[in-house]
Image (tube, grey):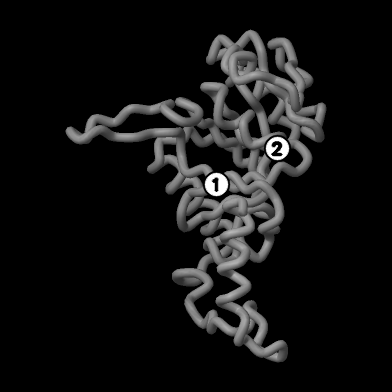
Amino acid sequence: MSDRERVLGRVRRALADVPEDDTPYDRAVPRDYLREHGERTAEETVELLAENLADYRAVVHRCTAGELPALVSRLLAARGAKSVLVPDGLPPSWLTAADPAHVPDRADSTPCELDAVDSVVTGCAVAIAETGTLVLDGGPGQGRRRITLVPDHHICVVRVPGQVVASVPQALERLSPARPLTWISGPSATSDIELNRVEGVHGPRTLEVVLLS
């Protein structure tokens, strides 16, 4: 018997006495908790997002759609990037002014190949203001999970206010649990027993977030 069969067997035994007309799971648990903390306008919610992103040491930029290509180009040039990873579905206009070589998001890319890429540019599925969190779900312009975990520099574009929500419960309403969700709160960081902060351990050392109005 495999481990999978053993676990599923335990689940079946645990559910054996549950009647077929029992309350479905999504209605069995009361969900009367706060959906957000305080009342804010859309503009105030975006400001809170920017504040919390900066608190997590992400670098926050703001621009319009017309200014985005030049901004992305400047950010890549400042990084000295010679290559940029481009996920499927990323709007081509975002990189029209960028000089680095474009590297496609391929299923057969090895960790070494991804590590050799200087930067990655993506969109996101939703951004959460109260926690300063970006969520990617592998949709168009976001790519596979690993492309935002291996390269050392990540530029993430957030459309505001449309992709910004106040709280985690509001974000979950927009996300599908069947998709590969990546939750990002600032650049990757960890601390040792002496509380020395080290960045870039299990994700990008530098996270730049563009709030696109």
Q: CA distance from mark 2 to mark 1?
A: 12 Å
Question: Residue flagged by tag 1: what amino acid is it?
Answer: Trp
> Which residue is nearer to you in this view: 47 or 146?
146
Residue lying at 64% horizontally and 8% vertically, measured from the top left:
82
For the N terminus, give its image quadrant.
bottom right
The residue sitting at 63% across, 25% down in the picture is: 120
Residue occupying image coordinates x 50% and y 50% = 49
Side (left or right) of 51 relative to 5: left
Dot 1: element: strand
Residue designated by label 1: 183
Query: Which quarter of the image is occupied by the C terminus?
Result: top right
Quadrant housing residue 171: bottom right
- What percent of the width, then of the height, locates residue 145? 64, 36
Residue 142 numbered tag: 2
Sequence-first tag of 2 and 1: 2
Q: 36 above or below 180? A: below
| Image coordinates for residue 137, horizontal then vertical, percent | 68, 46
Pick out the residue farthest to the left.
194
Q: Nearer the viewer, residue 23 or 61?
A: 23
Amino acid tagged 2? Gln
Asked if residue 102 lies left or right of residue 112, the reply is: right
Classify 67 as above or below 20: above
- Which residue shows up at 46% across the image and 30% down it? 202
Label 2 with label 1: CB-CB less than 8 Å: no
Q: Residue furthest front?
A: 1
Mark 2, secondary structure of its residue:
loop
Residue 158, x across and y down, in percent: 64, 43
